[in-house]
Image (cartoon, rainbow, N blue to C red):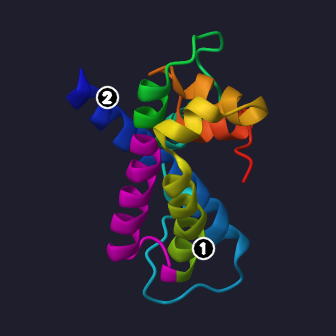
Amino acid sequence: MRKARTRSAQVAALALCLVLVGQHASAQDSRDADTRAPQLDALSPEVKQEINQLAQGLTRVQQEDVPLACGKAVENARWGVETMLEVGERNMQGGYLARADYEATAKPLNALLAQLTLADCESATGTRRDFYQCMSSDYNHVYACGKAHPFEH
């Protein structure tokens, strides 16, 4: 189960990165010559559709009404953030993501990671508690829960 979840999350995180990098690359007038950011236009319609479906799935809460389970919520949230950081770093090292773009994204993710603790979950109220409740489901992605329930600082 954990291995299947890991592979699925890596594919989904890569899809989200491809969409975000593709949007960023198409919005730039010029890019670094050594950045291999994929152009979504170069992909087949089927691949584009699959990437968009995966990315959209990451942005939606899949399971809404779950009981708060702080241990599971913190594990799921930390795992999701760590996976996004790892995929982003691999994309940067592979030349698919500019260092500045990776660093701009990694900074808030690392700050969030430092806040995701069992004690924080157990004392959470308001939207912060809602975020942890959302993350209590293995079917929800940290990006979707964060979007639905912004994690207050």
Please provide the residue range marked out in magenta.
Answer: 78-99
Residue 151 in the image, given as x and y percentages of width and height: 70, 44
147 lies above or below 129: below
Q: Which mark is residue 104?
A: 1
Q: Badge 2: how crowded within 10 Å, few (<14), some, or many (20+)? A: few
Looking at the rendered structure, the kind of residue marked 2 is Arg
In-image side of 72 versus 135 (left or right): left
Element under disc 1: helix
Q: CA distance from mark 2 to mark 1?
A: 27 Å
Residue at left offset 44%, top offset 22%: 138
Query: Which residue is labeled 2 in the image?
Result: 5
142 lies above or below 22: above
Q: Say whether residue 56 is visible.
A: no
- Return the residue nearer the eye: 152 or 58: 152
Q: Quadrant of residue 8?
A: top left
Instruction: Give the position of the N terminus as an image quadrant.
Output: top left
Residue at left offset 66%, top offset 40%: 146
Residue 62 in the image, given as x and y percentages of width and height: 59, 19
Residue 90 belongs to the span the image colors magenta: yes
Looking at the rendered structure, the kind of residue marked 1 is Ala
In-image side of 112 versus 149 (left or right): left
Residue 132 belongs to the span the image colors magenta: no
